[in-house]
Image (cartoon, coloured by chain):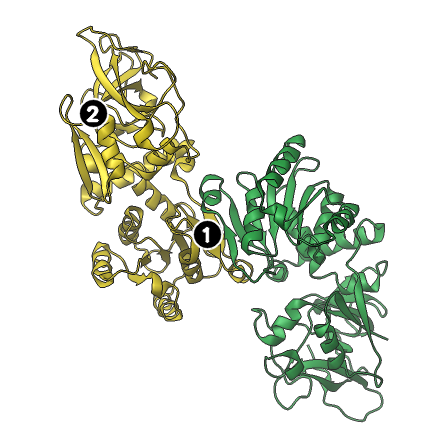
Chain colours: A yellow, B green
Amino acid sequence: MLRAVTPLTFRRTMIQAQAVLYKQHGPPKDVLFTQNFTIDDDNLAPEQVLVKTIASPVNPSDINQIQGVYPSKPAKTLDYGTDEPAAPCGNEGLFQVLKVGDQVREFQVGDWAIPSQVNFGTWRTHALGKEVDFIKLDKGITVNQGATISVNPPTALLMLTHYVKLEPGKDWFVQNGGTSAVGKYAIQIAKILGFNSISVIRDRHDANGTREALQELGATHVITEKENSEREAGDKIKSLVKSTQGEVKLALNCVGGSSSQGIARKLSPNGLMLTYGGMSMKPVTVPTSLFIFKNITSAGFWVTELLKNNPELKQKTLNQIQQWYKEGSLKEAPSEKLPFTEGEGLELHQLYLKGIEADSGKQLVTYE
Amino acid sequence: MLRAVTPLTFRRTMIQAQAVLYKQHGPPKDVLFTQNFTIDDDNLAPEQVLVKTIASPVNPSDINQIQGVYPSKPAKTLDYGTDEPAAPCGNEGLFQVLKVGDQVREFQVGDWAIPSQVNFGTWRTHALGKEVDFIKLDKGITVNQGATISVNPPTALLMLTHYVKLEPGKDWFVQNGGTSAVGKYAIQIAKILGFNSISVIRDRHDANGTREALQELGATHVITEKENSEREAGDKIKSLVKSTQGEVKLALNCVGGSSSQGIARKLSPNGLMLTYGGMSMKPVTVPTSLFIFKNITSAGFWVTELLKNNPELKQKTLNQIQQWYKEGSLKEAPSEKLPFTEGEGLELHQLYLKGIEADSGKQLVTYE
């Protein structure tokens, strides 16, 4: 992948690149560093593609990878010119093609691209790969949409469509974490596809404001966690579901604990709960009787694993999301921008650390 | 089903029958009663089969049905000659054919039979049905085997064979409740089929005695609940599983709570946990990471629902179990016998109440 990379030299024609790396796992502030390396852009191999980074976000899984608590990990390598093997950070990001080798057919200079697989390393200024390492994006979408298209929107779309057939206009899904990024994508995509949604939100003093905001996005019904644990909300949902002559066939869980129990109880017989996160840090809890007498199934969803060996599905999913973005029917989660200017302000790894330490909001490092 | 039944009269030629019934749900001691009724055995319809009961057990689900907390319920009827509609008790039991109508082909006088469906009512001296209401049993098995063949042995056999393909000599399953009736059937059936087993037993002062007893039945590996929650047991199991070049593809859960979490952790990637009971009264608990990163699935098993509309599977399962009983390769759970003698001792419903209130052991009411 990085065969044309050579350690830092002073040849003027080479690209001076930087990447955020770590040599061992640990707290990001202790282990991340910025590595300078060069890319010989005058001598690309025939199948190589050289890209520069436009923007890359900080995702929770990126942080977990650095900490060593995430099961999918980049290999450590000497390719960046470090004295010991080191691994690159970042799994999501938007690139622009700077140069292509003679045999490259799919990409032209100026094209937008994202990594085709995780663990490619997106917290860096430039990257050199082969055609197969990249997926082309449509330039009709925004930088923020492109840089955050690989994880959350496919998670929402695939959970809603890949496991259970929801009948438009009739069937329902229920989710907790209704205000999370995936939760908001799921609400919007369900609205586009005609599925009814029940979204559970945290108990907060402005629950009604949140409820209205989600309804504006397309939510059918919004309840608080307190309501999620009470009988009345269940009765109300039963009557809503009856009114559409549908079923609650799917539950999406990113919280766990009593919240997962609450949404599992909303499922119709033979329903499926997919767990894709565990924000409460508590295990997934489902009453025994739901398994035995309602034939509920509880399973997991991991977009990385599902798409790893299924490039057709990944491409189809990305195409659909780009189309909705261009039509304006889907709105992406907003990002807080952290602009990187070489030689000014923070070093590259310090800028990502700032993103890691931010209190709230998706953090997006943008490159000039 | 009971068209030839008429209220109690003094015609000498009729069969004087008794059944345990309830008019409303509640604690068994408050709601059960013995109803006398007659069966006109001289005027069987051409398709009818008249049976007498040989033995019928008290199962936990029978009690839950009476209490009104079980989802599958017998219909209330006036067929037994009660003043208000009443429902029959008991779902499992062994009958002997007393008489058959002219068009009955499958049954002869003297044959053994069990009800083909639940909710038929087995806590009674006699029953009148059609051919389709009964399944013939082989008389080469014992009364206790025949009277307890419908629930626990098929539960164990079907959980081990109907969902996941375990490879003989290589693959493993893990279960809690290792000393339960189903647990012991599962250990023996796994041994017959060549599957390796890990059985979790309660922490008790004679754990080693229990361990040896289960190993004598064919258990591969037995651990206590305390060990089920500790890392060492997991490491030991990993090395055992590695030694057979297999995987732990299946977990059978009848406990819930932390015990279910312990056995779920023993599963190999892509494993399935089937829940068929909840003895701890705590919900099923599975760590979030097992769902997302190990792709574990958690589902339920209810033999009633699985076999309700699948008579071929039921027949095939019963045939297999009878064959193993006859060969002597499968031992059934022993029963405490409660003999019923009409006109002497306890009334019929009092005898079943005695069985309901027994501290331990499967209770089997036997008829003279």
Q: Quadrant of residue A251?
A: bottom left
Whether residue B294 is visible to the viewer of this picture, yes or no, is yes
The answer to whether B183 appears left or right of A67 in the picture is right
Q: Nearer the viewer, mark 2 or mark 1?
A: 2
Residue A284 circle label: 1
Badge 1 crowding class, 10 Å Cα cut-off, few under 14, some 14 to 19, many 20 or more, is many
Residue A347 circle label: 2
Count of numbered marks: 2
Residue found 29% across the figure and 32% down from its top: A92
A152 to B129, vertically: above or below = above
Q: Indicate the chain on which mark 1 is placed.
A: A
User: Looking at the image, which residue sits at the far bottom?
Assistant: B10
Q: Quadrant of residue A126?
A: top left
Q: Could you say which is closer to the camera, residue A211 or residue B205?
A: B205
Task: Check disc 1 and report its element: helix, strand or loop.
Answer: strand
Residue B56 circle label: none
Q: Position of residue A61 (x, y in %)?
A: 35, 37
B89 to A227, vertically: above or below = below
Amino acid at dot 1? Val
Whether residue A56 is visible to the viewer of this picture, yes or no, is no
Q: CA distance from mark 2 to mark 1?
A: 40 Å
Q: Position of residue B29 (x, y in %)?
A: 67, 81
Q: Position of residue A102 (x, y in %)?
A: 26, 11
